[in-house]
Amino acid sequence: MTSQTPIIPRRLLLGNPSALDPKLSPDGRRLAWLGPIDGVMNVWAAPTEAVGAAEPLTRMAGRPPTWHDWSPDGRFILFLKDENGDENFRLFAADAETGESRDLTPLPKVAVQVLLLSPDLPGRILIGLNDRDPRRHDVWSLDLASGARELIHENTDGFGWFRFDWQGRMRLAGRNMSAKRAQQVYRMETGRPEPWRLIPFDDQFGTAVLNFDRIGGRLFARSSVGRDRSALVAIDMATGNETVLAEHAHGDVVDAIRDERTFEIQAVSASHARQEWIPLDRRAGRTIVMIRAAAPDCEFTRVSASADERFWTIAAHGPREPPHYYLVDRDAGAMRELFSARPGLKPYRLAGTRPVVVKSRDGLDLVCYVTLPADEPSSRPRAPLPTVLLVHGGPWSRDSYGYDQERQWLANRGYAVLNVNYRASVGFGKAFVNAGDREHAGKIHDDLIDAVEWAIAEGVARRDKVAIMGGSYGGYAAFVAATFTPEVFCCALPIVGITDLATLLESLPPYWADVVAQFYRRFGDPRTPEGRKILRSRSPLARVDRIRKPMLIAHGANDVRCTLQQSDAIVEAMQKLGLPVTYVVFPNEGHGFKRPENDLAYHAIAEAFLARHLGGRAEPVGSDVEESNAEIRAGADVLGAAAG
């Protein structure tokens, strides 16, 4: 395979970003973001007007933070971090002046939740801790200066979530009611739960409480109750009257920008094939128009805002544009670029992405994305290409239009990339989500096959050179492809995937107790003979003898969602049958590979594997595997000549 486009080094495409997620301090004078130190993402800070003078506030090893933000009084930068992928997140505070970092929740086997940051509670925040009962989070008030905690609510009622007004008063709580097949929402003002509203089962993915206004009189929420697609609604807490504020003709309302003074919603977004923002006030509308003009082929999110709403930071990204971060001065009507997440990619030509709608065999519209190598025509390649079907996780997630580093990596190596929003994907209305119920390895897999057939008919894909790859549910889809339709794909690359659905449902983290009913209804109930029969019939492990094509299986040893047992079991079964398999395990990772050295090692192995079976280009493996914790437990010969 020949190409005029240079190979982009993996470290530029997939290594640590240079900077991520700049958050404004409440007064707007300082920024905090994540950037690498010794190969690990850490917290950096700088004056807003002097980003070049940035200094690292933390120098922590291990896995990177998953979230960071300023404390309401601007004294600390808070962040969450686990150690080895076990998702037992701890809350840390870094002093904004001295950089001194403290672990505010030094508790073993506890997954901290940040519940409320409020300008009306400047010195403290509300958090959830599941130290008393691993299944349930109690509510605590945490003093950020001293680290002292005060118990606010002991969660003996089994609530799955809470909502507070900005003064820190608990106003709402919710839990799933199996008998009612619905989620019961309670008002909590009196200190005793009072049933308020029911969210029907079919509406639970499209309905979510967002926040109260500043005085607590109105509640904003996304709601699909009584409609197919989620709308933004406001509920008067005194009368119960509900008003629709915004909706979209083809997609769910998914993101919201709120005013940091009044906490009213200023704008919402929805996405069918492309993102659209719907402003709710004139000033927000003007700001959105300005951003769109500056980044016309990009999608954007607001990352943070100053307390007076003069300044925003935003992230803008498009198929050919890695995330760029801007400071928006709303008073001046001006934008200034702060930095790019991947400035090293600027000299390279990146691949474009085209949205298409493919009809499923039973008539559903499947929003898909096609990405071709940068030197191919934008609509159709000169000749059919080896293709990777890249399947998103969830399944209650979705693929979108903007920048995707996996697409860029694969396209640069010479492959067409196909993303499919199969039934059960979110963002397209509840009927589309519900069409995926108990259709795992059924109609959901049919959607993937239908999209592949479309790509072959359109001259995008070569029939004999289609691979399937994905993580989590995408990993399950790859296992399904290898065992249910082994003739369609020439190889499969499941990452932290699922091989036995009953094992998945019996080993979910204990604090997922409130959502187990969703899994039982939508997959099958392992507590019943009928449910176990359904789960087994849709489990790749039960059909391992049908595997015919090469597989590269990868997993994190500490995965608490799709446990290592999922991959261990199918690898053992394959080896007993004499089926060739490459198996890579990362001992210090969980549900995904967050340490950059491990992520690079996986991609180096996957690149060599794809080059062998699809015929694309490959950068030499070099030292990428040696520098990681990768354990190649089977099939190390896949590296072959690529190790040079």
Image (cartoon, helix red, strand yellow):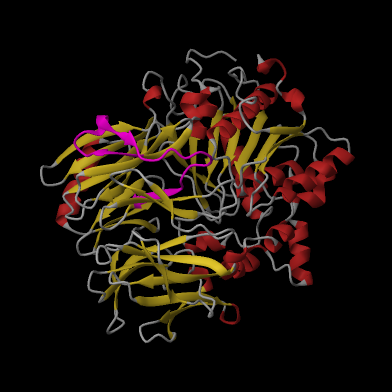
Residue at (30, 32) in percent of width and height: 339
Residue lying farthest to the left in this orientation: 332
Residue sitting nearer the eye, 7 or 556: 556
Give, as a single range, the part of the protein colored magenta. 44-69
Residue 92, above or below 171: above
Residue at (39, 82) in percent of width and height: 187
The image quarter in which residue 176 lies: bottom right
Q: Is residue 447 magenta?
A: no
The image quarter in which residue 338 lies: top left
Determine if residue 459 is in view. Answer: no
Residue 63: percent from the left, percent from the top? Answer: 52, 42
Residue sitting nearer the eye, 235 or 452: 235
- Residue 514 in the figure: left or right of residue 499: left
Quarter of the image with the N terminus in it: top right
Residue sitting nearer the eye, 367 or 526: 526
Residue 180: percent from the left, percent from the top? Answer: 56, 81
Q: Is residue 62 magenta?
A: yes
Residue at (61, 41) in percent of width and height: 470
Residue 154, above or below 457: below
Residue at (49, 20) in percent of width and height: 8
Residue 585: percent from the left, percent from the top? Answer: 69, 38
Quarter of the image with the C terminus in it: top right
